[in-house]
Image: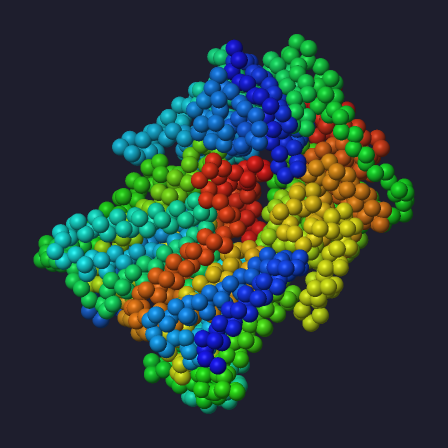
């Protein structure tokens, strides 16, 4: 029986495509995997189904009823229940309150502690979770406990469609999850299972859909599960982005710009060592949330490290703030993850966005000289392929790609010789990506050292001299750009070193 | 020694406990240094003045728990107390009370609509409502005056009873009722959602609970509480004064700060706020008996508020840091914000 | 020349300016920029309101009333300059009346009781004001505490301090030099000195807010503190400095008001706080943003004082003034809010945050 019909779903953010005419159907009583690279559109699909994202086009039918978009409660009432990857638990409430959040039991209008707790305990017990105290606040729990509660919340609402988005990201023991997922399937629920770990998918899923660039590009059945085929379909060869080649080989005697030893940042980065030489592009790969952000932000001075040593140009550097980072040695600049919040001044013009690092240079006695500000910004903007017309527009009105070019122009003006680029091409259109690549190449050609994180592995393969793979806060693999393949990187990214067995995760 | 240390640590870390401790110290200084032994009348006078402040500050506390601000409390208090003292001489006082509470609800609702639907900054919107309400009060009552219904005064202050029969002063009784109401409210759905919205709006939205409805309800309830405070204030001063509310702008936030509610959303307690209001009102008496009065009392108040807010902020930061250590990367946004607060 | 004709000429000049501008491409761009068109509209509105005053008082409009309006605009403008910067970076300074009182008291008591030279008293008052701003700003920036609470408390402390400095005696009189400058008695070419100072404040304010590195940094911080920080700006210093400059402006206003009213009453600054906030909002500054123009705020001070002068002529009670301020603030907020939609539609304000994750 068809339970879910998704037809022609599209969603664009600016000029980036998240969903591009996705069409698929799912049956009741199956466990249906959705696989794809980061940015393939899986999460957006989940969010459309859960009522968080309103698509630009397309429709969704659940058990023959049209889904009204953008309302989590409507989705819930049609029987969609989701365990989110980023978890929807509220940290200052107790476990019990979280479990029952949308249907808190009341007695004369009062939610009695005993009532909630006994009911929540019962629910957790029913789903085989006995080691979590329902009374404790969520903030005090470990990540894996939180993930289990998130899953129980989704399981417990008796859904027609159960969506599990990376449910095992923090789970060490998957048998608990699999047992209940199968129980749900046998009771007629359609389970949508999203994971990077192909071994799990092979073990538990009946059927699978492969996504790429927001579209459905393939399907597979448990019976004909073929690891290599799935991966090659996922990666695809459809976008053949021309990565600009290195103009001259990396010089043997290039000096080391930044050297990191045993860096620890909270619980997210546990002992990372790396170095970047002048003119080198070093790539960092890894699944999301393996400590990349914390590594980049602590090197950029945006968050404090707990221990470890960073040497910039041979001298020990204290990177307390982004300002001190920008002033240590040849200068460190961070191209941040959240462009809107940390990358741009959205209600100011590109000129003013770009000129930030050179304000003192373009001013006399504290007064800004408009003409020199404009000419410096224009030069930096055009070097970064920002169309001249956009210079006087507010950056918030520009497309993601042009916003990012503004950020890069500012970074270039800062004169920093060490660039920390955190996923600089996220959410920007292909042509803008190409321009970002060429900018990157150009600056590395001029002796700038780049540390590049990207969720898109082909990018790292196409640009980097070396690729380091992070997993669980550590660097688990290091390879030369010329030796690296997408399979090798992925294998390390899911925690399997290249020597490990060949089945298992992707 | 370690026992003392742990007590000190507990007082320092929990907002309400800290507030209770400050209150106790101030009260004792007042009681011990008073020229004559304290009589029940002294206590009642103190409580009668603290009551309206406490009620209004509880309203603001609710709004702050949802991570918003409300400066309009002082305006509603002024208007409603003026209304109690002026217009409705022939009308039954209880009808006036209901009317006044409805006015409070309406103002709160309007604040909420501007903040939730028009997405205007709460601080500017409620500043505007504050000014408007103060203006309306001045139009209603140009010079202080008017009179307040005797029954109402008796009910709030307990003044008609012979002093021997009143075991607990009436305002204390009302405060006790408020504490019970608060404890119950905290356990209603709205009460739980209130804390949830203040901590993590996105997660609440994901859970399918309407953040807007929660915010609107809380603004409205707060408005009702301000109006109730106005009723109590009218009974306490037995007349109306269109300028009396001005001091409430500061003192509501002072009561909340001293009461240990941090201004970060998702945490706070009405009980702490009641302690804060009692502290604020005992402070002039305490300062008077030890010979500080006039201008230095004002300075003292200001410094105390700043210290209280600082204590709250520092302990919130520390908790944020702790959260970050124990928890994984999920609570990042909150913890990061707090920890990075002093990062730059 | 009669005042009516003079005001008509002002209106006509504005109209002709707009007309000429609309005929060329560059001019049309100028007309589209809020930094140009908004002050123009506000000033012309003020002239219109002044004409309306004729219905209530035969004394309106007159050169005298224009003089009064511009003189009072001076105080609103000076305060609004500081408040505007603070609001731009997302704060709200409620300590202004306190700073005004202390600064005025220092000058008055300093010259009359301690017999300081006027200049010394003025310098001491300004240093003290800056210091208060430094303290508030440091606490706000370092501990991320809502600005209005700290400034409210600071205001209380300062009110206490200025009470203490007068020792409960009658409000001390200001020095003659200051009174001559700001009371409007002193005149140059028949025009009151405060009006010249008002224009000077307009120019200085523009240079600082729109042209200086400091002003730019305030905009950057207001637009996005996170970006400013990542981009290597000294965010802590910027935030503190804005409060220092804000308090300094209030301190200057305190001295001016001392001259205007003759003596340092405790309540000297009370009635100027709300007009200043209103002027900032009417001028189109959005709290915590990169949006706002000093020239608009400056023009708004004229409009607001005109409205007040006219209202006073009508003889309505004081309360109406407050109501009007409140309504004007609300209207200004609604008209200038960056997100123009009333969010009755399905999308919720947080959706974007969720989508981005």
Q: Is residue A106 above or below residue B24?
A: above
Q: Answer with the quarter of the image where residue A262 lies.
A: top right
Instruction: Give whichever of A464, B328 is nearer the camera.
Output: A464
Q: Is residue B215 above or below residue B170?
A: above
Residue at position x 70%, y 58% from top?
A: A355
State whether residue C204 appears in this view: yes
State whether residue C30 appears in this view: no
Instruction: Give whichever of B290, C79 is nearer the camera.
Output: C79
In the rendered image, residue A257, in percent from the top left (x then y), is placed at: 80, 50
Q: Is residue B179 above or below residue A476?
A: below
Residue at position x 51%, y 20% from top?
A: A61
Q: Answer with the quarter of the image where residue A55 lies.
A: top right
Residue at position x 76%, y 48% from top?
A: A384
Instruction: Give whichever of B96, C38 is nearer the camera.
Output: C38
In the rendered image, residue B5, in percent from the top left (x then y), is placed at: 43, 53
Q: How many marks?
A: 0
Q: Is residue A138 left or right of residue A113?
A: right
In the rendered image, residue B267, in percent from the top left (x then y), is placed at: 42, 46
Q: Is residue A199 left or right of residue C199?
A: right
Q: Is residue B39 above or below residue B331?
A: below
């Amino acid at each position: 029986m068809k339970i879910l019909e998704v037809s022609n779903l599209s969603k664009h953010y600016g000029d980036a495509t998240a969903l591009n005419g996705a069409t698929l159907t799912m049956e009741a009583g199956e466990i249906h995997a959705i696989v794809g690279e980061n940015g393939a559109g899986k999460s957006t699909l989940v969010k459309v189904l859960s009522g968080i994202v309103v698509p630009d086009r397309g429709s969704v039918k659940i058990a023959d009823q049209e889904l009204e978009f953008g309302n989590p409660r409507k989705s819930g009432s049609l029987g969609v229940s989701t365990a989110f990857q980023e978890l929807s638990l509220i940290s200052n409430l107790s476990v019990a309150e979280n479990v029952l959040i949308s249907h808190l039991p009341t007695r004369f209008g009062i939610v009695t502690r005993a009532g909630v707790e006994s009911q929540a305990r019962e629910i957790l017990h029913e789903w085989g979770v006995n080691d979590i105290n329902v009374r404790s606040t969520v903030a005090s729990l470990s990540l894996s406990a939180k993930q289990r509660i998130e899953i129980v919340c989704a399981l417990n609402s008796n859904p027609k469609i159960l969506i599990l988005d990376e449910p095992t990201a923090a789970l060490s023991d998957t048998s608990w999850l699999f047992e209940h997922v199968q129980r749900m399937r046998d009771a007629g629920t359609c389970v949508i299972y999203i994971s990077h770990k192909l071994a799990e998918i092979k073990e538990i899923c009946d059927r699978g859909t492969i996504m790429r660039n927001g579209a459905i590009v393939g399907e597979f059945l448990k019976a004909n599960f073929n690891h290599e085929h799935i991966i090659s379909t996922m990666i695809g060869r459809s976008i053949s982005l021309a990565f600009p080649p290195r103009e001259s080989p990396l010089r043997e005697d290039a000096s080391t710009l930044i050297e990191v030893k045993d860096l620890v940042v909270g619980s997210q980065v546990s002992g990372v060592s790396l170095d970047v030489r002048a003119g080198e592009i070093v790539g960092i790969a890894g699944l999301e949330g393996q400590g990349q952000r914390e590594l980049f932000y602590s090197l950029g001075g945006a968050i404090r490290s707990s221990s470890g040593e960073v040497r910039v140009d041979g001298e020990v550097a204290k990177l307390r703030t982004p300002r001190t980072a920008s002033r240590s040695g040849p200068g460190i600049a961070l191209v941040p993850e959240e462009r809107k919040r940390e990358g741009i001044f959205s209600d100011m013009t590109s000129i003013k966005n770009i000129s930030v690092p050179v304000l003192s240079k373009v001013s006399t006695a504290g007064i800004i000289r408009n003409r020199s500000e404009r000419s410096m910004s224009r030069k930096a903007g055009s070097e970064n392929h920002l169309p001249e017309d956009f210079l006087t527009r507010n950056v918030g009105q520009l497309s993601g790609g042009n916003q990012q070019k503004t950020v890069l122009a500012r970074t270039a003006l800062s004169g920093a010789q060490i660039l920390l680029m955190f996923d600089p091409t996220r959410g920007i259109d292909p042509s803008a990506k190409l321009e970002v690549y060429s900018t990157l190449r150009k600056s590395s050609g001029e002796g700038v050292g780049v540390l590049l994180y990207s969720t898109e592995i082909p990018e790292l393969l196409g640009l980097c001299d070396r690729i380091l793979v992070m997993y669980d806060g550590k660097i688990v693999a290091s390879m030369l750009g010329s030796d690296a393949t997408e399979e090798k990187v992925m294998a390390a990214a899911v925690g399997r070193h290249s020597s490990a067995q060949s089945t298992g995760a992707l | 020694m370690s026992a003392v240390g742990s007590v000190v640590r507990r007082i320092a870390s929990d907002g309400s406990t800290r507030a209770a401790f400050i209150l106790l110290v101030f009260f004792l200084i007042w009681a011990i240094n008073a020229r004559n032994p304290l009589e029940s009348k002294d206590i009642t006078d103190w409580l009668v003045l603290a009551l309206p402040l406490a009620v209004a500050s509880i309203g603001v506390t609710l709004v702050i728990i949802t991570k918003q601000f409300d400066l309009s409390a002082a305006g509603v208090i002024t208007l409603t107390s003026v209304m109690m003292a002026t217009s409705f001489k022939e009308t039954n006082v209880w009808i006036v009370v209901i009317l006044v509470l409805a006015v409070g609800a309406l103002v709160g609702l309007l604040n909420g609509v501007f903040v939730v639907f028009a997405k205007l900054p709460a601080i500017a919107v409620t500043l505007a409502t504050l000014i408007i309400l103060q203006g309306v009060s001045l139009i209603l009552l140009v010079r202080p005056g008017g009179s307040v219904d005797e029954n109402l005064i008796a009910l709030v202050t307990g003044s008609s009873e012979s002093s021997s029969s009143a075991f607990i002063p009436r305002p204390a009784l009302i405060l006790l009722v408020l504490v019970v109401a608060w404890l119950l409210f905290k356990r209603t759905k709205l009460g739980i959602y209130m804390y949830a919205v203040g901590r993590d709006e996105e997660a609440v939205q994901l859970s399918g609970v309407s953040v807007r409805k929660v915010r609107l309800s809380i603004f409205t309830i707060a408005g009702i509480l301000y109006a109730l405070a106005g009723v109590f204030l009218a009974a306490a001063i037995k007349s109306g004064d269109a300028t009396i509310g001005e001091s409430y702008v500061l003192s509501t936030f002072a009561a909340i700060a001293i009461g240990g509610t941090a201004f970060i959303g998702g945490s706070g307690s009405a009980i702490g706020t009641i302690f804060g209001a009692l502290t604020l009102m005992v402070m002039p008496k305490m300062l008077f008996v030890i010979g500080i009065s006039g201008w230095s009392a004002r300075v003292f108040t200001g410094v105390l508020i700043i210290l209280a807010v600082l204590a709250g902020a520092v302990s919130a930061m520390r908790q944020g840091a702790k959260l970050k250590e124990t928890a994984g990367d999920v609570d990042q946004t909150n913890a990061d914000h707090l920890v990075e607060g002093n990062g730059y | 020349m009669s005042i009516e004709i003079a005001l008509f000429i002002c209106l006509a000049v504005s109209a002709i300016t707009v007309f000429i501008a609309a005929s060329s491409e560059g001019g049309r761009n100028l007309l589209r920029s809020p930094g140009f068109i908004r002050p123009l509209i506000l000033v012309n509105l003020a002239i219109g309101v002044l004409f309306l005053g004729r219905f209530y008082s035969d004394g309106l409009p007159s050169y005298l009333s224009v003089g009064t309006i511009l003189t009072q605009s001076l105080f609103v403008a000076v305060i609004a300059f500081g408040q505007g910067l603070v609001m731009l970076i997302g704060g709200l300074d409620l300590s202004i009346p306190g700073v005004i009182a202390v600064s005025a008291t220092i000058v008055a008591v300093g010259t009359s009781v301690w017999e300081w030279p006027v200049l010394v008293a003025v310098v001491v008052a300004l240093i003290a004001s800056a210091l208060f701003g430094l303290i508030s700003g440091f606490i706000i920036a370092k501990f991320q505490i809502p600005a209005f609470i700290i400034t409210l408390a600071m205001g209380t402390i300062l009110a206490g301090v200025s009470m203490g400095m007068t020792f409960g005696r009658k409000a001390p009189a200001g020095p003659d030099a200051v009174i001559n400058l700001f009371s409007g008695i002193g005149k140059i070419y028949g025009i009151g000195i405060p009006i010249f100072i008002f224009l000077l404040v307009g120019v200085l304010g523009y240079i600082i807010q729109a042209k200086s590195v400091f002003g730019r940094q305030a905009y950057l911080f207001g637009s996005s503190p996170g970006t400013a920080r990542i981009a290597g700006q000294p965010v802590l210093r910027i935030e503190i400095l804005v409060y220092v400059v804000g308090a300094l402006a209030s301190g200057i206003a305190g001295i001016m008001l001392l001259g205007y009213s003759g003596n340092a009453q405790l309540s000297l600054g009370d009635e100027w706080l709300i007009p200043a906030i209103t002027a900032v909002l009417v001028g189109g500054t959005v709290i915590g943003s990169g949006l706002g123009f000093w020239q608009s705020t400056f023009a708004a001070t004229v409009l607001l004082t005109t409205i007040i002068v006219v209202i006073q002529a009508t003889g309505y009670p004081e309360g109406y003034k407050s109501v009007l301020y409140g309504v004007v603030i609300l209207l200004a907020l609604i008209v200038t809010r960056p997100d123009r939609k009333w969010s009755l539609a399905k999308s919720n304000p947080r959706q974007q945050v969720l989508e981005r994750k």
